[in-house]
Image: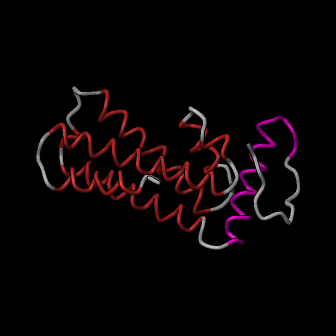
Amino acid sequence: MNDGKSFVALAQTLGTQTTSKAAMRSAVSRAYYGAYNYARHVLRQLGYSRIANGRSHGDVWNYFQNSGDVNAVNAGQMLADLDAARVSADYHLNKSQYEGQKNVQWSIATAHSILNEFDNCLATSAKRVTVAQGMGKYEQVLRGGAPTPPTSQSQGNHI
C-alpha cells in the first residue's frame, strides 16, 4: 500500500537530482501529495475513513488543525501551507519561485516534518485516542452540537 511516503521520496529525488523547472515544480507537488496521502492514511487509522475518502483537501487539514493535539495541529497547518505552495507550483507558471532549490527544499523538508508529526499522532494507543477524541469534538461542533465528553473507546468508527 502506498501511504504517501514514497511520493515524498520521489519529491526528494526530483528536487535534488535535476535542475529542470518542470522537475522542480513536480517535486513540490509530489511533496504535498505524499504528505496529503499520508494524512488520509492517518485519518483511516483513527477511524475517520469518511473524511479520508472524501474529496475535500481542506476537510483533511481542518480535522487535524481542530483536533486540539499539538502534533496534529502542527501537521494540519503545515499541510495547508504546503498545499498553497503546490497550487502555485502547479497552476501559477508565471511565478518562478518554485523552480529554484530554496522553495523546493522547503517543500520537501516540510513534507518530512508533516510525516513526523503524523507518526507522533500514531505513536501510542493513548495518543491515537487523544487525537481521535479531539477530532470527534470538532466533528460534533461541525454538526451544530456541543462537543461530547470523551469516551474510553480507543477508536470510534466515524464512517
Judged from this view, the residue extending furthest toward the front is 1
Above or below: residue 86 compared with residue 93: below
Residue for point 44% across, 51% down: 35
Which image quadrant is residue 16 in? Answer: bottom left
**Marker count (numbered):** 0
State the image coordinates of residue 51 (x, y, percent, origin top left): 64, 41
Q: Looking at the rendering, in which quadrant would you find the C terminus?
A: top right
Q: Residue at x 21, y 43 (%)?
A: 24
| Residue 130 falls inside the magenta stretch | yes
Coloration mode = secondary structure
Would you place residue 120 above or below residue 106 in this image?
Answer: below
Observer-nearest residue: 96 or 72? Answer: 72
Residue visible at 41% across and 38% down? 84
Residue 74 lies, in percent from the top left, at: 54, 57
Q: Is residue 77 magenta?
A: no
Q: Is residue 46 left or right of residue 4?
A: right
The answer to which quarter of the image holds residue 95 is top left
Q: Position of residue 1 (x, y in %)?
A: 47, 54
Horizontal side of residue 128 vs 146, given as left or right: left
Q: Is residue 43 left or right of residue 86?
A: right
- Classified by dominant secondary structure, the portion drawn in magenta counts as helix
Q: Is residue 36 left or right of residue 156?
A: left
Q: Report the residue at 55% width, 52% height from top.
A: 41
**Residue 149: where, in percent of width, then height?**
88, 57
Tell me where the magenta segment starts and ends, as one range. Answer: 125-146
Q: Quadrant of residue 28?
A: top left
